[in-house]
Image (spheres, rainbow, N blue to C red):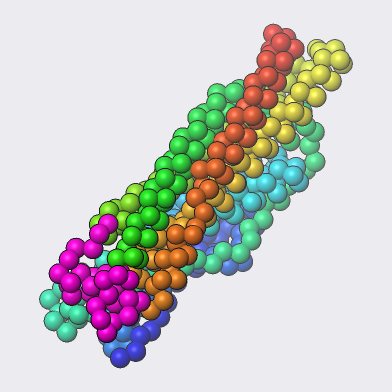
Amino acid sequence: MGTKKWTAVDYDAVKYLTKAIGSKLERVELPKTMSLQVVIELDDDLYKKLAKDPTWLAKLQDAAGDKARKAMDEAAKLILQTEAKAGKFDAKTAAIFTKDLQSSLENAFKTASGEMADAAVKLFESYKKGQKDLSDFRIKAVGKIAVTAILVSAGTAVSVLSAGALSPIGIVGIVRGGVAIGQEITKLALSADQIAKVIQGELKVLKKFMIDNAPKGNAAKELGLNAMSKVLGLDTPSLKNCKSRIELHKIDIAKIEKKSHDLSKKIYEAMDEQTAWAKKFDKAKKSLPAPKVGKISTALEKSEKALDILIQSTIKINESIAKAEKRQEAFEKTLKAMEDGIPGWVKYVDLAIGLGLDLGLGLADASSAIEKAATVVFSVEQLVATEVIDRA
């Protein structure tokens, strides 16, 4: 009996978003390709049955569609937020926000496609109840995405003192919030690294157990942990613990991703505050001596650079999250291969135990950069307050 990989769900996000918000976009150009897919691996006989069952197909589209539409609605909000501010961007800021928006969309769609795949598996388990001819069948489902480049165009050229810079006035509290989020992200990342270190140790133990206890006539690489436990009548050491820690690792990464989104929101809040500050400063500088205007201009240039670091740090955090998700995927695939006795499982193990444990280090660097940027913003805020606030 053969197996087949079936793209059972394929949502066209471009079509959905174009219809939902396409008429509202001037500065943001949607990617040419955006899709969320569910690929199911199943036996040929089962495929023939499911592919011709309109009830199953309708339920699958509904179950996966709920997850997809939720992700696309969130994407629409994020895109519109960027569109609302893009008219104020200079070329440099537009490029930075393009990268951030691209990363946010890819992460959101990746999470949604995984949820869509989980929904497909749960639906099948429910579907086969009461159908004896399906009781022995299993399916595997994975989520896949395809997202080409998005583009955020700059608005008209603007001066550093107007919309092109992010003034520290009014955003100090926002930046402090960003510092706190960065510190929380670092703690979660260090926790994930520590859990990953333990997981790698347990995988080594399980590897040795499989090799040492493989019954005669069965190569260790061909006999899985589940089958071995039944043959030997033994509980495999650390299997339960390893599974639970892999789940904890996944939870920590999800928490980091949520915090990263919170940090991104701080940037948008800062942009709103900048608009209000620009009006105030335009009014104040009319009555300020030229030397004071020059001093404030220099200070605001420093602030702009510092806040660019905040944006870059957010992008770096999102990139680190993507690497951590790959680490999680490797752990899950490895344990599954060991349980099932997939040929070549030793390679899965060796790859997983050789993965780097530097998530905490990388995110700590990003958090440190955020704190340094905040220090600059705070000092500039004091200077501007002295020079302007009392005269505005």
Q: Is residue 87 left or right of residue 332?
A: right
Q: Is residue 260 left or right of residue 139?
A: right
Nearest the viewer among 131 and 68 is 131
Q: Is residue 129 left or right of residue 190?
A: left
Q: Which residue lies at the image location 64% right of the left edge and 24% below the top edge?
A: 375
Tell me the magenta residue range. 210-238
Tell me: residue 66, above or below residue 101: below
Q: Which residue lies at the image location 47% right of the left edge and 43% below the top edge?
A: 189
Q: Which residue lies at the image location 50% right of the left edge and 33% below the top edge?
A: 183
Tell me: residue 184, above or below residue 195: above
Task: Give percent across and percent down for residue 360.
Answer: 51, 43
Residue 124 showing in the rendered view: no
Task: Give percent across and percent down for residue 280.
Answer: 69, 20
Task: Give percent across and percent down for residue 143.
Answer: 42, 67
In which image quadrant can residue 176 be found? top right
Q: Which residue lies at the image location 54% right of the left edge and 32% below the top edge?
A: 178
Nearest the viewer among 213 and 288 is 213
| Residue at the extreme top | 390
Quadrant of the frame with the N terminus: bottom left
Residue 287 magenta-drawn? no
Task: Give percent across and percent down for residue 270.
Answer: 60, 32
In which image quadrant can residue 291 be found? top right
